[in-house]
Image (cartoon, rainbow, N blue to C red):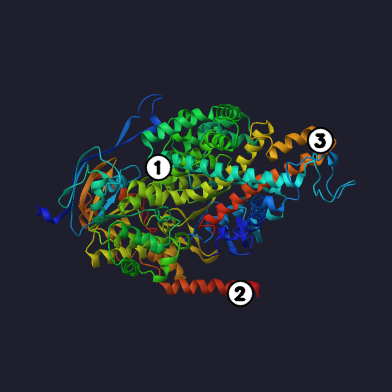
Amino acid sequence: MNAAVSDQIYKVQDLRVSFPDLSKKPLFGAAPRTQVLKGLTFDVAKGDVLGIVGGSGSGKSTLGRAMIRLLDPDSGSIRFEETEIAHLREDDLRPLRKHFQMIFQDPMSSLNPRRQVGGIIAGPLRLQGFDNIKVRVGEALEMVGLPKSFETRYPHELSGGQRQRVGIARAIALKPDFILADEIVSGLDVSSQAQVLNLLEQLVRELGLTLAFVSHDLSVIRRLCSRILVLHHGEIVENAATAELFDNPQAAYTRTLLDAIPLPDPDQVWA
Amino acid sequence: MPDARGQIRRLPGLRLWLSGGWLLLLVLAAIFAPMISPHDPLEQDLFAARLPPFWEQGADPAYLLGTDSLGRDLLSRMLYGARLALTVALVAGTLTCLVGATLGLIAGYYRGWADLVISRLVDIWMAFPPVLFAILLIAVLGTGLTSIIIAIVVIDWTRFSRVVRAEAMSQGAMDYVASAQVAGRSRLGIALAEILPNVLPTIVALLTLEMGIAVIVEAILSFVNLSISTDQPTWGGMIAEGRTSIYQAWWVLVFPLFALFLTVLSFSQLGEGLKDYFDPVLR
Amino acid sequence: MSYLAIKDLTVRLKNGVPLLRKVSLEVEAGEVRALVGESGAGKSMIGKAVLGILPRAARLTGGKILLDGEDLLTLPPKARRERIGAKAALIPQDPLTALNPSRRIGPQIIDRLVDILGWKRPKAEARALELLDEVHIQDPGRVMKSYPHELSGGMRQRILIASAFAAEPKLIIADEPTTALDVTVQKQILKLIREMQERHQTALLFVTHDLGVVSKVSQTLTVLYAGKVIEDTNVRAFFEAPAHAYSQALLAATPKYTDPDGSLMPVPESIITAVEQEVAAFDAQLNG
């Protein structure tokens, strides 16, 4: 099916990313580079919740970070809305940044320990030239279900689930069109995991967000996502709608991944 | 559940008070030295040479801590000596910190060629033996307060840049730095607003440590008679003089040594205490 | 008589805050018992108390730990360490930090056998090779000569399993041994742990936060909250219908992709309040 151009928020073509492999660095000269993403091509439609799944070393987090240009691709094209961003300089990216935001895996390290919650959420708003910052901070906290009194708390005074809500509030306060969520529930207990997922679900619905959700956990992805990219060794092995992927997984790797999930069910038999 | 970190936060209180108290006393002594000194620190009175401190036999109550072999009042000389020690500590310590921390921050956060240049420079610098380096510098610059300060800055900036570089590098890898980038903060903005506040406790601890080191370096240079003109009293100079008469008049050596020791210790303890104070996790 | 029996075990922080509240449980030879709970439930603390490796800030203030019928806590420290070294072993969580990065694999396994069992080196070396083969490592000779960083996470965990079983302990404590691994590797490692445990008829105490993993490895389980035992039951009964409301909520919160509408349910606030009250009432009874 060919969707109209305006329906796609992201068009990614032949995206390649490599990192220097320092373990193989010769005594003199540059380290050889390891290909982490080996030419990925896919689109993200507006309003989609895209799950990006894979094992460690599959390149799923690298892909997410490349999409919001936290790192520089070697080659290929990333079209965000109408703009080609794959090779834009940081100075030119800065005005665009309010349109794509990120929620980080480890809220403890992604929230500056020396800032209070209010300042953490206000910072990006101020940088991007928003007005009524106090009001917006209050709204963002309310949307993630935290009381206004949290504005004066420090990150270390919060529980893991609360910290992750602050991370979400900081991202949605800018009213972005796209949010990347990188393994944001993997460090949480199951009880807060479910709460954060519910919150995301609700925000996607209410704010009309497009979300890319990077995770190693297919169970979590099934709950939240409408489409799924399965990555393996830096390549897309499957790109399908969620229901399709779970009903009839095409790639052998997807099936291996599904089979390996331990279900809370003693009757599940492991081959 | 109460956080275990909360329980150790009461501890730094006492040492902060003790070290801060001694240093405050020293600052007051230095400022008001001309007013509170019982004698002119340079006035010699050979009839009153080697008088012991007040509690010893044969002491003169006019000379509380006794006199040296030229009959100069020890207390007055120490008060004036505190002036020089503190000036060196504050000025040299601060300048060293500014130079070293700035270079360290640039190297650690901006990486790339800046890091390459600064790190190589540090490596080369550290290969010089520091005391020889200092003596060499003074020989070139001539003696005097300014020379001492320049010598300390030139030699010791590496201490800051190495530690701050490593700290800035590890902070730079944290996700809050990435999140500032996502928010559209500039490189300089990230370095100053995100990295610097998190490196600050380390810098403060190093700064106070450096102040103590500056006091020692000044004393060493005075001891080898390379500091400033001999007619200005310095703790290092007093220790050097006291060494020659240790068997006849131990007090000439012991009092300035004790002041030096207490001051250096206080600076390092102040640093430890302040470091905790600057850390919101511990506060 | 169970191989490991813990009775009324209480561990407190130095300031008196309880980490474990009168925990009792038993593991028989050949049995796998899972210890389940969320972070802060004290599940790892139990294993640490048994092995005598409690963190500095924690103190054992009451209870009994019977290992093979002998109360460990009444033994003098040296005898206790020897008993634990000979009869129990740990499979740790992080396969990277549990191996010394600057030593080759072989000596790290062999040393255990030489030190604990007093074996001669050639015998220990032969046994180490045999163990690596037993945990399905191909080319054990080459792996013995490798450094930890040259091996994958799954491989390192296999080595730690081999070295845990090396001295033929009758009790093994596995502390979240697959949390750091990919699901595909986790599956292999869980199967391997079960296989080794069955072959050696070891009593296994398996600490985990994942009820999915529990259903794959264990026969019995103990659910903890804030260091208190909430439920002690067998796996089949638990997954059919947990007895305690908190356990029910925990099970409903656990992801299950085959049942997207019936899993990943948030734990209701009322249940947390209720279980907090239960713990407080328990404390009041203890102190009063």
Residue at (55% x, 45% y) in the render: B207
Local packing at callout 1 (Cα closer than 10 Å; few below 14, some 14-19, many 20+) is many
The location of residue B220, given as percent across then percent down, is: 66, 34
The location of residue B281, given as percent across then percent down, is: 51, 57
Residue topped by disc 1? B109
**Position of C244 compared to B26: left or right?**
left
- Figure quadrant of the C terminus of chain C: bottom right
* Nearer the camera: disc 2 or disc 3: 3
Under mark 1, the amino acid is Tyr
Local packing at callout 3 (Cα closer than 10 Å; few below 14, some 14-19, many 20+) is some
Whether labels 2 and 3 share one chain: no
Given residues C38 and A198, the one toward you in this image is A198
Q: Which residue in the rendered view is the most extreme toward the top?
A: A28
Helix, strand or loop status at disc 2: helix
The location of residue B227, given as percent across then percent down, is: 63, 34
Under mark 2, the amino acid is Ala
CA gap between label 2 and label 1 equals 53 Å
Q: Quadrant of residue B247?
A: top right
Under mark 3, the amino acid is Ile
The location of residue B27, given as percent across then percent down, is: 64, 52
Q: Earlier in the sequence, mark 3 or mark 1?
A: 1
